[in-house]
Amino acid sequence: MARKILAVDDSPSIRQMVAFTLKSEGHTVVEAADGAEGVAKARAEKFDLILTDQNMPKMDGFTLIKTLRALPEYHSTPILVLTTESSEAMKTQGRAVGATGWMVKPFNPTKLLEVIGKVFRE
Amino acid sequence: MVSKLDEDGYTPHISPTIYYDRTHDIEAAKILPGEYYVTQRDMVIVTVLGSCVSACIRDRKAGVGGMNHFMLPGDEAAEGVSQSARYGAFAMELLINKLIGLGAERPNLEAKVFGGGLVLRGFTTTTVGERNAEFVMRYLNTEGIRVLASDLLDIYPRKVYYFPKTGRVLLKKLRSVHNNTIVDREREYEHRLRVTRIEGDVELF
């Protein structure tokens, strides 16, 4: 099923690749270049899923997740972290702040789509 | 410290080799294929490139700079977003994240890029160096990172000295490869990329 997805990453190259992958499956994608822009866009309209990087200027992924989790409309929305961080410590922290899942870059497009399917139990 | 390389075989990792460069009277970090280095100190970062490329990136305001050394893996039939583009973006992002972590800001980043020589002849159908050079230029353009200087392609191996504090680069084109060390190291790196599944782990909580 086509979903509305917010893709947050400070790298335009990553945003392009992620958006291309998601759009090829019929999803609608809105991009944001850092956590602060991500929060602003998520407040402006409701997304079915948020895909976010961790290391970003202005506001990082963890802060974005914490901020969104405090809003009633994003209390249980799936939020996936797509990051270069592969340490267990970071993953544990991500889980603690409310991430739904953790994907380490470089991402495999097929796997990304599979994970999104699993999140929605499709 | 367990190097990332030992874990998955493809993740670029921080160079462990620090020495004193007597010629330039300065502390030096030497990086090999698949490594990178970032510093706030007054240092020189040194590498020798064959068909690989290096991006030297710094934020002069924040006083932090670094260099990587990588090549793209050979590609599966390029459908949609290719594996090589994803790997290249990953290698670049590790360097940029580290710079940002040490206080650099994206709009201030400036780059110098080197390498992509036709050094590994006859080892794949397309010229590896050319793909690497094209990638790094396209990537920096997409990222909006200014390229102040570049020396790419041609047939020479290059020795690069990068002084991140000043942004200065000394470039030596090596006329001939005296021994096969450069080629051997690149082949070994290329092999690692070829035999490893280049993708990160996925976990749903």
Image (tube, coloured by chain):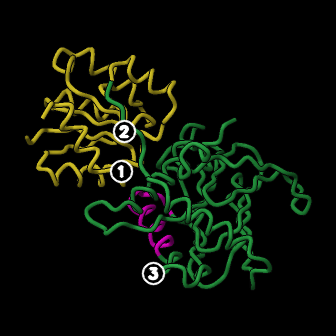
Question: What secondary structure is the stretch in magenta mostly built from?
Answer: helix
Type of amino acid under label 2: Leu
Query: Which stretch appears magenta?
Result: B131-146
How packed mark 1 is, by other alpha carbons closer than 10 Å (few <14, some 14-19, many 20 or more), is: many
Residue of label 1: A14
- Reply above or below: A52 against B205: below
Q: Are marks 1 and 3 on the same chain?
A: no
Residues tagged 2 and 1 counted as in contact (Cβ below 8 A): yes
Q: Are marks 2 and 3 on the same chain?
A: no
Give the quarter of the figure containing the C terminus of chain A: top left
Front: mark 1 or 3: 3
The chain letter corresponding to green is B
How packed mark 2 is, by other alpha carbons closer than 10 Å (few <14, some 14-19, many 20 or more), is: many
Chain of the residue that carries numbered disc 2 in the rendered image: A
Chain of the residue that carries numbered disc 1 in the rendered image: A
Q: Nearer the viewer, residue B157 or A104?
A: A104
Q: Residue at x 60, y 56 (%)?
A: B34
Residue of label 2: A82
Q: Position of residue A105 (x, y in %)?
A: 42, 45
Q: Nearer the viewer, residue B145 or B118?
A: B118
Residue of label 3: B126
How packed mark 3 is, by other alpha carbons closer than 10 Å (few <14, some 14-19, many 20 or more), is: few
On whether residue B88 falls in the magenta region, the answer is no
Instruction: Describe the element under mark 3 as helix, strand or loop.
Output: loop
